[in-house]
Amino acid sequence: MSPEPPDVARRGQWLRGLLDICVLALLASGESYGYELTQALECAGLGQVQGGTLYPVLLRLERAGLIEAAWRAGETGPARKYYRLTAAGRHELGAGGAAWLAFAERVGGILREGGVE
Amino acid sequence: MIRTWTMAEMTLRDLIRRRTVVGLLFLLPLVFYLARRDDHTGQAVKFLLLGLGFTSSAAGLFATSAARSLEPRLRLGGYRTIDLYVGRLIALIAVGLAIAVPYLAVVLADQDVQRMPALALALALTVLVAAPLGMLLGSALARDMEGVLLLLAVTSAQFLTDPAKISGRVMPFWSAREIATYAVDLTDIGYLRRGVTHALVCAAILFVATAAIAAVRLRRRRHVRIVSSSAPV
Amino acid sequence: MTDQEWLVRMALELRRRAVAESRINQTVGEAVAHARDSGQTTERAFGLPEAYAAQVASSLMAHVARARPRIGEVRLAARGIGKRYRRRWVIRDVDLVVRAGQTAAVVGANGTGKSTFLAICAGFLTPDAGQVTLHGAVGFCPQDGGTLDYLRPAEHFALLGAGRGTPRAEARRTGRDLAATLQWNADSDDQARHLSGGTRQKLNLVLAALGDPEILLLDEPYQGFDQGTYLDFWDQVWQWRDRGKAVVVVTHLLENLDRVDTVLDLTPRVSEAEA
C-alpha cells in the first residue's frame, strides 16, 4: 500500500482528537448506530471513518457516561446497538464544542496572519 | 511447617541447578581424597572430610547470599524468619548427605576401614557443621567473594593447625579429624566422644549465630506499627 | 480471512485480555451488525482482529477522572520520617498518607532518598526518625534483584504463595493471570536468570501483588519495560486502585502524575539543603 498523501495523514490526526466531540454532536439530533454515524461523517466531508476507529471511541464515550447504548431491532431489519446522548453528554458537547470552536478561531487567526486565505 | 518445607524444596531446586556448585560439591572432596590416597588411609580420609566440609560450606554460602534480596519479601509474604533459615539448613544438609553417601562407598571400596559406622558418622557430622558454617558466612558478609575468601582462610587454617593444640581444637572441622582417627587408626573411644561433642557444639554455635544474624536482619522493625483491619486509624 | 475467522480471533484476543464475557458478546455483535450494514468485510472495516481487540480492551480500561473509586480508610501513614547517612539527613520530616483506593507517586532526582523512603515504609530499613503505620498486608517490588536466579516463575509463585498458606496450584494460577495483564506468559520453564531484564521485573511485580495485599509499594518497577508494557503497568496500577488497594510508586518519570492522588516530592528544599 502506498503511503498516504500528507493531507490525508494530517486529517487523520485531527480526526483522532475530535472524533468523540463530533460523535456527540451527531447524536444531539437523535439516536443513531455505528454504521449510520460513519455515513453521516462521510456526508459531512470528513472522509471514510472505519469501524475500527469509530467503535472504540463509542466505547470510551459510553464508559465516561456521555452516551448510553441499547440493543434494539431497528425500523429496517435486525438488531443493532443504538446510541444516544445523556445529559452529561449534552453538557460535555456544549462545553467541549465551544472550546474547540474558540480554539479553531484562534488557530485561524494565526494562519491568516501568516497569509493563508 | 509447609513454609519451612517449601523453603527447603526451593532452596534445593535452586542449588541443584547451579552446575558449577554441584560439580564442585561432588568433585572437590574426590580431588582432596586422591591427593592423599596413596598415603596412609587416615590422611586420605581426613582430606576427604575436609574437602566435603569445604564444599558443603561453599554451597551454604551461595544459597544464603542468593536468597538475600528475596528474604525480606518472603517475610512480608508471611514467612517467619525461622522458616527461612531452618528450611535452608534442611536443604543444605540433605545435599551434603547425598554427597557423603557415595563417598562412603568409595572409601569402603578403596580403603580398609575397620570402623565403618564411625566413618559414616564422621561424614554426617562434617555436613552438619559445614552447612551452618556456610550459612553464617553468607549472612554475616555482604559479598560472596568475602565469604569465599573467609571460607578458604578457615579451611587452610584447618589444614595448618596442629589438632593437638588449642588452636587446632577451635577449628570447626577438628571433630572430623578426631573421629576419622578413631575410625581408621583404631584409637580409644575418647576420640569418638570428643569428636562428636565438638561437632555438635560447633554445629550448635554456628546455627545459633546464623539464627541470630537472620533474626536481626529480618526483624520486625520498631518504627512500623501494624494495625488490624477493623481498627480505625 | 473470512468474517467468521476474524470474529473468532477477535473474541479470543478479548478473552486473553480478561474482558468480561458479556462485553465480548456485545463487541462481536456490534462488529457483525456493522459489517452487515456497511456491506464490508470485518477485516476491511476494523483492521486486524487482534489490534481491534487491543483497542477495545484499552478503551474499557481507560478510566475517566470523573468515575472516582470509593476512597476508604487510611492504609499507609508515614509521619516524620527521617534518615541520616553519616551526618547528613538524606530525607527529613517526610509525611505520606495513602488511603484505600488511592495512589501516590514518590518523585525526586536520583539520590534524593526515594528508595530509602519506600524501604522504610515496607519495614526493611529503620529510620532515624518517624513512624509508619500499616493497615493491611504489604507487597513490595524492588527496582531489580528480588528473585532466585535458578528458579522458574511458577516456582517463585509457589514459594511466595506458601507464605500465606496458598495451595501451590492456586498460587501458580494467580501468578499466571497477573502476568497475563502485563502481556507475559509465565508458564515458561525459563529460569529467572534467563529472563530479560524487563521480564524479570514483570516477575518482580507479579510477586509483589501475588498475595493480593492491601498495600503495594513499587520501587521504579518498570526497568527494562518497553513502552507497551509500561502502559500496561500503569493500567494495572489504576485497576489495583479501583479495587481498593493503596498503591505507592517510586518514579522519576513524570507523565502519570496528574492521575495519582498524592505526589511526594523528595527533592530537598533549598533552605534544608543549606542547613
Image: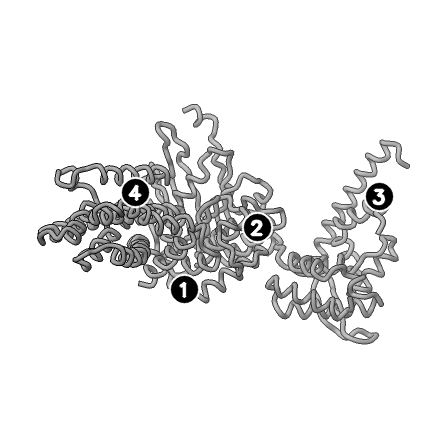
Q: Disc 1 or 2, which lies upstream in sequence?
A: 1
On what subunit does the disc labeled 3 rest? A
What type is the residue that disc 4 sits on? Answer: Leu
- Residue annotated with mark 3: A6
Q: Nearer the viewer, mark 3 or mark 4?
A: 4
What residue appears at the point 64 percent right and 70 percent down from the top-left corner? C22
What type is the residue that disc 1 sits on? Answer: Thr
Contact, mark 1 vs mark 2 (Cβ under 8 Å): no
The percent position of residue C247, horizontal first and vertical second, equals 48, 50
Number of labels in the image equals 4
What type is the residue that disc 3 sits on? Answer: Pro
Viewer-nearest residue: B111 or A113: B111
Viewer-nearest residue: C234 or C131: C234
What residue appears at the point 84 percent right and 43 percent down from the top-left corner? A6
Q: Nearer the viewer, mark 1 or mark 2?
A: 1
- Asked which quadrant contains residue A43, the reply is bottom right
Mark 3 vs mark 2, CA separation in Å: 33 Å
Mark 3 vs mark 4, CA separation in Å: 68 Å
- Residue annotated with mark 2: C234
Say which element carries label 3.
helix
Q: Quadrant of the C terminus of chain C?
A: top left
- Residue annotated with mark 4: B137
- Residue annotated with mark 1: C166
